Structure formats: C-alpha cells, structure tokens
C-alpha cells in the first residue's frame, strides 16, 4: 500500500469531502492563502477557491461561533483551530453553543460541524500551546471527540467526522503530521473509519496497553521491547475515538490479558485514562490480576525546556516500567 | 432630520394594508398578554429558573420581524418570548416550555431563555450574553453560502455590546460581507447597570460599528413605523449588497431584568417608569396611531386585547394540563445520530451512566 504523511492523509480527506458535498467548507486562520500553518490544507484554496476554503482573522470566538451558526442551517463547516490550545478563547461557542443547542432546542437544531487542529505537547511551546483537551471536551454530552494516531486513521476518521450530523472534535498532533503510514489509494474506493470503533494495533496476551493519539506509538514501541527483552506479549488497543467510546474492545482486551496499562498524554486528574480506568474496574474487575496503571503527562503545566519536556510526556520507557511493575 | 421624518410615508409602511396594521396591533397585544400571563404562575412556583419579560419593548420584535422573508432568520438572547411569537410560534408551546412540560417548544429542555422554531426561521433563545452574536453571523453566512438572498437579524441587549464575541462578530461580518443585522435593544439597563456605568464610549452604542467600517443607525423604538423603516434599510443593505448593519433601537422594559430582580425600583426612579408607561408605551401608541388613521376603534382594540388575554389564559391552562417530560427523555436530543438510530448512533458508547 502507498505510504503518505498524516497531514496529506487529512488533506486528502478534505479534498474528497469538498468534492463529495458542496456544503463542506473549510475555515480557519491561515488555512487558505497561507496553505495552513502546518500545511494540512496545502493546495486546497488553489483548487477550491474562496468560497470553499476561507481564511479567518485571529478571532476564534467569532469564527467558531459563525461555523456553529452556519451548521445549524445545514452548512458543514470544518473549522481549524491552529492549536486546540486556543479552545479557551472560543469556549462559549465550543461548549455552550455547539454541544448544547440541539438539547436546548429539544432536538430541533443540530450542528454537523467539525472542529479540528493539533492537540499535543512535545514541541517546546510552553504551557499555553500544549494542551490536550480531548478529555475535557469528551466530558460534554453532545460532543464527539476523536484522536487519530496514524495517517490512515486520520483520513478515515476525518471523512466520517465530516459526514456525521453531530459536532465532532478531531484532535490531531503536530508531531504526527510528518509521519508516513499506509493509506488506501482513493482509486480503491471511499475509505472511512466509523467513530466509536477502537483498533487493535497489536495483538497480545499478557497486558493491554490502551492509548489514543501519539501515545499509541509509544505503546507500540514499548510492546516490541517488552516482547524482545522481557518475553511479555502486550496488546495495543488504539481507542481512536474517545466519545463515542468502544468500551467492548477495551473490556474484551482486559478480559483476555488480565492487566491494563493506560497511556494517555493528558494530565492524570480526570483525564481520558481516568474514565477508562473506572470502566475497567466496573466491567472487568474480576478479570484483573493487578492494579490498573496509568502513564500520563506529569501533572504540572507543560514545561518549555527542550531538554526536560520529553520527560514530562509519556514514553515507551515509562510504559515498559509500568508494565514491569505489575508483571 | 430624523425628528421631522414621517416614517409612515416610507414605501415599506405605505405597503401595509389596514389588515396588516391591525395584525401588528394584534401581535403587540398578544405578546403583552402572554408576558403578563406568565407572572402569576411564576410567582406561584409553577415555573423554574429565570423569567425575563419583554413588556415595554414589544414594538421592537414586532416591527423588525414583520419584515422578514423566507430566507431571513431571527436569533436573540434570553429575553426571547416576543421574538418567538413574532416569528409565528404559538402561545401553547411557548407557555408549556416555561412550565417545563413535554409539550413545550423545546420539550421542556430549554426553558424561558431557550425557545426555538427553526421551521419558522427562529433559532433561539440564547442564555449567555453576547453568545448568540457569532451564531447570527453564521446563520447569515449560511444563507449567503447557499446562494440565497437572505439575512439574519441578531438581537441583543445593550448589556451585550461589551462582550468580545460581539466585536469579533462585527469585524468578521464586515470583512466577509455577511448579511447580518445586529439589533441592539437598548432598554437602558444591563441588568442593574446603566449605560453610563458600563460603556466607556459615551456616544450611542451603535456608533461603535464605525470602528469596523460598518453601517449603523439609531431608532426610536416606540414608533413602529420608524422601526420598520430603518430595519428595512438594513435588510435592503443585507439583501442587495450583502453588507451588515448595527441598529440600536431605544426602548424600555417595565419590569426588572428578570421577574426575580427585586432591585429594579432602586436603580431607576418610579417617575421614570411611570413616564414610559404613560407616554411611550408602544402598544398604546400603535393603538392610538391606528385609531387616528381611522383603522381601529377603541372597542375594536379592546376586542383584540380581550382575545389575546383569553389566548394567553388558555395557554396557561394548556401548559398546566400538559405532561412533564419523562426521565428517559433526558437522553434524547443529545446526539442527532443517536436520536435517529443510525449506524453511527449505535456504534460505541455515547452515554456513561450505568
């Protein structure tokens, strides 16, 4: 299969959906003439023009809310936040309006909108630019949240998100944009991945490594080393979708391996992994042979120091240590 | 000079038939009576939360909405009952929503601040001050995107104009030629704070639009003809040039910020309230206008008012007799895909209770 970069997989998803549905419109800061701050939308303005790919001023509350309003009328905006970290200046629109308007209208309104952008640490940009808010937004009923780890998942989930009739918040990753992976050729048909379906990225029998986003890569790397150096067979469950959540995949894996280590770049307090932990104890308590362990970011605002920031984030070494502590 | 213009003579008002004018009076009376009918059940504890009444401001919603065509949309803040009725919603579903009943327009999920009727181009009913202003921008953008000659009238109170989202919306509206009409219903008080104590800029609020190179105007809200005349200019600008406008319509509310606002007689004088009621009441002024035009008699007006009062009373009865929503309905209307039992709506876990 051909291999393309994560950013190009997303680009392909936009291009295909722009072609498929005239209501799809891309909006954001620098998405058009500048080709995207991270070149995710490269070439799309040239191809689709001002109507379909729109530059917005640095004005997140204004343009995110505008997208929500347009989606209520049946436009399907795909809104780029240059960083998900900028959610805080548009929070009222992202939560009070996008998540709630369907409910408050008794189902009369809906918001078929995608909010997207990178949400990760590890690039030495300090605390205000390094938020990972997938757990935060997944905590609001009415919203859906996905966090793809691979190029193929990025494309497949993005296309599904654009077609979904609810607000879907896609958390990408600047450190993954340049990573290549196999993605089916468009000539072979329409490639989509449903929301709410996890992917077993590696089969194993001794411990379940449950992760999403870039943490999946750490889990995979750890799994290889655990096998090679310790004879431990780790299964890697990539959640892909945070809400809706593939609870069955999580529980089935834990019932098989009897051990769980959750790898989650968010902070530990009430993060995604905290929710997964409670589900495991509730639905697979009798199958656990050891306490559930979590590898999260160290619980402080993101440090800038390039020398130290990697130590704040999950890594394969930390995953290995956590696994060995319960094996 | 604005003071010498006879707005009854502008084309949009000349087009009004006698029946049209009487219908406008009927709507004014119905809104007044609807709001009045809420007070007793609210004080009896039959409604929850807040209740922000529109009494005194009726000519604003009635005059502006009367100009809307099939591609024109309406969105407003939490003082939303009048706009809902003006857009054609029935008293029953509105009153039932206040009672939190399943027959309410939002199935008892929204309450007083969240009336909706997208089928009538009415998009709420929004509780966060200024939070609806980007949504109004989006509705107007949506019509333009679809190639229709439409607009969105987005209402807010004078208290909303200091919110960042509003200013962001103004900038984007002018920058991208979005056909939105922002109507500031200036009733003089943002809750209990007068304009003098909340706005650094001492000229009119609408004039702030100049910072965005945007057209603006001020409107005497007690004159229905003037409201219609100036709103039509803004709608023409939206429809024909795809350009936004800020209109500041001066009006007044008789009651507090909400019914629970116990201080409303402290931050304004009884004389001020009495003067408005006696000399500037928009319902009375329109009635007198129609009588002076020979289109209505006192008796005719009374009959219309009586009918409105009966309709409002009937809506209270309807609401009281309606069923509450079920506890199960809490999980409905959260996700479109779940409600419609699509493959997406049945894949993965959406709700996280046991």
Image: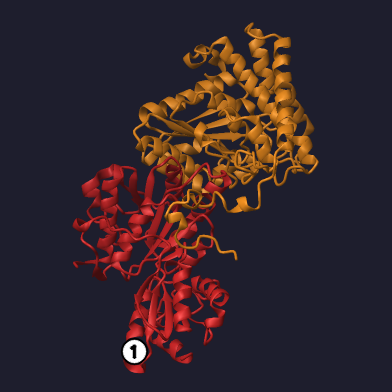
Tell me if residue A67 comes above or below residue A126 in the rendering.
Answer: above
Tell which chain the image draws in red.
A
Tell me if residue A143 comes above or below residue A173 in the rendering.
Answer: above
Residue positioned 66% across, 46% down in the render: B325
Q: Quadrant of the N terminus of chain A?
A: bottom left
Residue A145 pos. (x, y %):
44, 61
> From the viewer's perspective, is A317 left or right of B8?
left
Name the one closer to the observer, B25 or A303: B25
- Numbered circles on residues, count: 1
Name the one closer to the observer, A135 or B341: B341
> From the viewer's perspective, is B80 left or right of A263?
right
Tell me if residue B341 comes above or below residue A176 in the rendering.
Answer: above
Q: Quadrant for residue B256, please give it.
A: top right
Name the subunit of mark 1: A
Name the one closer to the observer, B255 or A211: A211
Does the rendering let one see residue B5?
no
Residue positioned 78% across, 29% down in the render: B271
Pointer 1 local density, CA inside 10 Å: few below 14, some 14–19, many at least 20: few
Residue B96 pos. (x, y %):
67, 37
Chain B drawn in what color? Answer: orange
Residue A125 pos. (x, y %):
39, 71
Residue carrying label 1 = A227
């Amino acid at each position: 299969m051909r291999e393309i970069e994560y950013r190009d997989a997303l680009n392909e998803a936009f291009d295909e959906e722009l072609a498929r549905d005239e209501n799809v419109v891309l909006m954001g800061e620098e998405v058009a003439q500048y080709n995207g701050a991270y070149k995710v939308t490269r070439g799309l303005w040239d191809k689709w023009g001002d109507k379909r790919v729109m530059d917005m001023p640095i004005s997140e509350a204004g343009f995110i809310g505008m997208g929500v309003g347009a989606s209520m009328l049946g436009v399907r905006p795909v809104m780029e936040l240059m960083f998900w970290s900028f959610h805080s200046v548009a929070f009222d629109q992202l939560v009070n309006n996008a998540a709630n308007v369907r409910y408050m209208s008794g189902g009369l309104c809906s918001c078929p909108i995608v909010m997207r952008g990178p949400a990760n640490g590890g690039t030495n940009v300090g605390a205000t630019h390094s938020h990972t808010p997938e757990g935060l937004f997944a905590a609001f009923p009415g919203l859906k949240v996905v966090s793809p780890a691979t190029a193929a998942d990025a494309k497949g989930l993005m296309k599904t998100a654009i077609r979904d009739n609810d607000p879907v918040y896609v958390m990408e990753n600047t450190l993954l944009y340049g990573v290549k992976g196999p993605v089916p050729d468009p000539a072979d048909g329409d490639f989509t991945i449903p929301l709410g379906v996890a992917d077993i990225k590696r089969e194993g029998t001794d411990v379940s490594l449950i992760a999403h986003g870039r943490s999946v890569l750490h889990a995979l790397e750890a799994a290889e080393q655990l096998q090679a150096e310790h004879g431990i067979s780790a299964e890697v469950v990539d959640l892909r979708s945070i809400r809706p959540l593939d609870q069955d995949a999580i529980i089935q894996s834990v019932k098989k391996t009897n051990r769980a280590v959750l790898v989650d770049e968010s902070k530990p307090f009430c993060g995604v992994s905290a929710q997964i932990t409670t589900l495991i104890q509730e639905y697979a308590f009798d199958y656990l042979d050891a306490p559930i362990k979590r590898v999260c970011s160290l619980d402080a605002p993101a440090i800038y120091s390039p020398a130290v920031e990697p130590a704040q984030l999950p890594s394969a070494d930390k995953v290995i240590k956590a696994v060995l502590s319960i094996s | 000079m604005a003071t010498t213009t006879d707005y009854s003579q502008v084309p949009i008002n000349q087009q009004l038939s006698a029946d049209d004018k009487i219908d406008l009076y009927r709507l004014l009376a119905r809104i007044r009576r609807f709001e009045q009918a809420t007070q007793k059940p609210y004080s009896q504890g039959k409604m929850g939360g807040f209740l922000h009444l529109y009494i005194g401001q009726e000519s604003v919603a009635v005059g502006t909405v009367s100009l809307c065509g099939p591609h024109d949309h309406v969105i407003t803040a939490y003082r939303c009952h009048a706009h809902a009725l003006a857009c054609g919603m029935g008293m029953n579903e509105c009153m039932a929503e206040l009672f939190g009943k399943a027959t309410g327009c939002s199935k008892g999920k929204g309450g007083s601040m969240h009336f909706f009727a997208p089928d009538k181009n009415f998009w709420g009913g929004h509780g966060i001050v200024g939070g609806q202003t980007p949504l109004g921008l989006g509705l107007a953008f949506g019509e333009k995107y679809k190639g229709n000659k439409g607009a969105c009238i987005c209402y807010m109170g004078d208290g909303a104009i200091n919110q960042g989202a509003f200013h962001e919306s103004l900038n984007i509206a002018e920058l991208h030629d979005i056909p939105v009409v922002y109507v500031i219903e200036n009733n003089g008080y943002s809750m209990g704070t007068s304009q003098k104590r909340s706005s650094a800029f001492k000229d009119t609020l609408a004039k702030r639009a100049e910072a965005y190179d945007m057209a603006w105007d001020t409107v005497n809200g007690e004159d229905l003809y003037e409201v219609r005349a100036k709103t039509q200019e803004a709608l023409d600008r939206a429809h024909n040039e795809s350009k936004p406008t800020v209109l500041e319509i001066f009006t007044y509310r008789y009651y507090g910020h909400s019914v629970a606002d116990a201080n409303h007689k402290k931050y304004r004088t009884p004389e001020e309230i009495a003067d408005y009621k006696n000399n500037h009441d928009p319902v009375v002024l329109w009635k007198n206008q129609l009588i002076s035009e020979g289109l209505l008699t006192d008796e005719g007006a009374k009959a219309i008012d009586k009918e409105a009062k009966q309709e409002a009373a009937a809506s209270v009865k309807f609401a009281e007799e309606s069923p509450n929503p079920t506890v199960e309905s809490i999980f409905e209307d959260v996700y479109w895909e779940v409600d419609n039992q699509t493959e997406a709506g049945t894949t993965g876990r959406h709700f996280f209770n046991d």
